[in-house]
Image: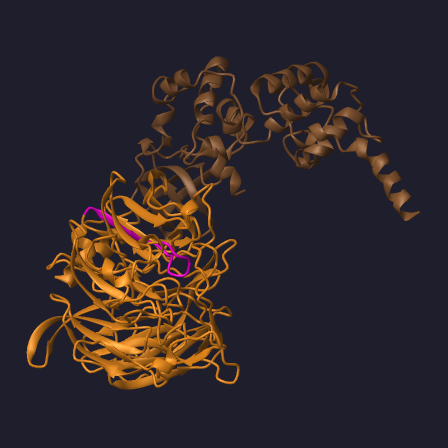
Chain colours: A brown, B orange
Amino acid sequence: MRFFAALLLLFFFAPLAHPQARRLPTDQTAIDAGRQIYLGSCSGCHGATGEGSQGPSLLSGRASRLSNQALFSAIKNGLPGTTMPNFPMADDKVASVTAFVRSLTTPAIANRAPGDAARGEALFFGAARCAGCHRIRGKGGHPGPDLSDMGVERTLHQLREAIVKPGERIAEGFRAASATLTNGTRVTGVAKNHNNYSVQILDKSGRLHLLRREDWTALSVEDRSIMPPLADATQADDLVAFLSRQSLRPYAAAGASQ
Amino acid sequence: MKQQWMIITIAAAAAGTLAAQVTPEAIVKSPGAEWLTYHGDYAATRHSPLTQITPANARSMVAKWVFHVEGAKKLEGSPIVHGGLMYISNTNALYALDARSGRKVWYYRAAGAQGTRVNRGVAILGDNVYFATADCHLIALNRMTGNLVFDTEFALFAGGYTTSIAPLAIRNGILVGVAGGGSGQRGFVASIHSTTGKENWRFWTVPGKGEPGWETWGGFPAEMGGAPTWTTGSYDPALNLIYWPTGNPWPDFYGGRRPGDNLYSDSIVALDADTGKLKWYFQFTPHDVWDWDANENPVLIDAVFRGKPRKLLMQANRNGFYYILDRVTGEYLHAKPFVKKLDWTTGLDDKGRPKIVESKIPTPAGTKVCPSVRGASNWMSPSYNPATRLFYVVTLEQCDIIVASAKEPVPASGFRGTGNEGIPTEPGKFYLRALDVLTGDIKWEYPMPGPGIMWAGTVSTAGGVVFSGDDDGNLVAVDARTGKDLWHFSTGQSLFASPVTYMVDGKQYVTIATASDIFTFGLFE
């Protein structure tokens, strides 16, 4: 009897364990196909890049933490009790959409960026002047964050946001700072750290100023980045493509340790 | 000269901006106000010229700041201090702190680095700081920004290699070593160019087939030999010789498959700093079956020995003997036990070779041996004060039961020829001991009651105070001449690191890493 009950349960729940959800497509064609479906069916509620609008963001919060299986199921069957409807598509299409949504929160290097990486590299070290403040593998300037491993540490979406809207999220340790010292000297750069008793400012020449309360007469640490936004969408795409390839170690090795 | 240099450094630090690059010459003079290598000095005496804290005022020391290292479970590093910044490492991570306030200035995490082994510290040279990840990458970062300069893989994690080494900067080379004595990798010391990240040279501590010393392994594969290089060596700039300590042969507790002395395990190898060529070696425990790595610090001291000025090398070895060698030639000069629990040998011959007590060779049934596998001392740092002529070393009085197995060894499988267990009725006891530097006689000792788990070492100061961690989580200050305790502070954590001392803005500080935090002390003001 127990055996039959177990068989029945197995029969009943087996269809829910979509085999395709366990192994999502990794080829770019399928992910691009998923993107097209997403733009047509999902972006109205979740935003063009998963940032959320009427529906929740897919980049953070509960949606970003769903397992592949749960995400697949939510797309195919909907979420009862919420406004998320079901999308009765063939499983391979659901898997493509699932793979695309996953790509929004996986490291940039694991995905194909739409821009041209070679043009992005030329921009980075040339016209866009990124290398005036940032470094990649020892090449570039100060005092911005080192970008040598950005393809692993950020998603494509995060890279793009950081380029086109740098003020929206300030990396800790990179707030615009200026101090007037007791001898009248002015120090400007980014505050690596600060509190009521000390501030550590890194200036544009890469010099670090370790200041204590008695060292300054005026101090300003602002809730803004000193990085200017980039307006040109094509250039942003190209830079994202270039940065998405920056990894200090083979990506597979990085993935293995996570 | 040292005094003058100190004043210049202090003035630069007081200006609030970071001082100049670290030159090889500055490292030769370290420690002054700053602490520029893992040991503080190339000679590994860990003796600071700072005199502000003395036996008279040490009791007024207070905590100045504490920095919590997120996620740390077992910090084992000695910090480096330069230009007002303190550099500390944890597994696959490096922090730069304001040395006066403990405020974090920058942080580097090696994303994707594998392995969880502890990390013992940092090297500094030029505008770079260097540390090694657990998966054997040497990472060079800009000392002010933490930006990456290079990332060089020097051994394959996939091949079983891992490391905990604090690198050592010598001229244009950053020296690294590896673990592997307990897992069957072939040890080596490598010098990596300080600006290009390219390898200058590599010395294998197990000779390859047909090379001198290969015959001491009875055909056992060199690739599995062990003789790891997991602690930081010392350096004599005048002789241009590096003294690097090596660890045990593998498998640790069964020697039947590796008949012979197993060179260069459990040795000091003296290497030419420019080429890595072997100048001489001295092996403390030939054909080791007790896991007595010789990875204790090789301390370089110049002294008149038996009426003749000599360049000496001292080591308080894990096997229980305090050794004195001639560091020009490697000649054995003297040895004396520095623990009472020592029963594996009836003594050393006139070349320093031990006469083994056959009944102390581990068997499958288990053999009681003294000292224990952890050793009479270990990698916890000793120090030496030239004014007292005393060598300060943390010692462990303990025996173990060691069990041997002739099972076929498989590298990186966890097999060590079987292992050791403590004797519940004879728990280990730690003592800080002061040895007469030229005889090894114990002049005083400071008992350190506790659970028997510490790995903390010492730092000596010209102020006449020795600082050490103890087995109960205290940083203690004792009188360098008498061993009288002057001050202690309970950190509430176990200690696995050796303290350092430095000066910024004219104030002397003492720092020790606890299990998960960095504690810094100074005089009350």
The residue nearer to you, when weighing A215 against B160, is B160
- Quadrant of the image for the C terminus of chain B? bottom left
Query: Where B167 sits versus B349, above or below?
Result: above
Question: In the picture, which quadrant includes the N terminus of chain B?
Answer: bottom left
Picture quadrant where residue A157 is located: top right
Q: Can residue B392 be seen in the rendering of this structure?
A: yes
**Can you give x and y, in whole percent of width and height, for residue B171 in the image?**
18, 49
| Residue B84 is at least partly visible in this image | no
Secondary structure predominantly adopted by residues drawn in magenta? loop
- Report the front residue among B517 and B271: B271
Residue A242 in picture, x, y percent from top left: 43, 22
Q: Residue furthest left?
A: B308
Residues B465 and B324: in front is: B324
Location of residue B391 in the rendering, given as x and y in whole percent from the top left corner: 25, 76
Residue B176 is covered by the magenta coloring: yes
Q: How many marks?
A: 0
Q: Which range of residues does the magenta coloring cover?
A: B172-185
Q: Position of residue A20 (x, y in %)?
A: 70, 27
In the image, B58 versus A199, the foreground residue is: B58
Residue A55 higher or lower than B103, as above or below: above
Q: Residue furthest right?
A: A1
The residue positioned 78% from the left and 20% from the top of the image is A87
Quadrant position of residue B307: bottom left
Q: Is residue B156 left or right of residue A81?
A: left
Q: Judge whether residue A224 is colored magenta.
A: no
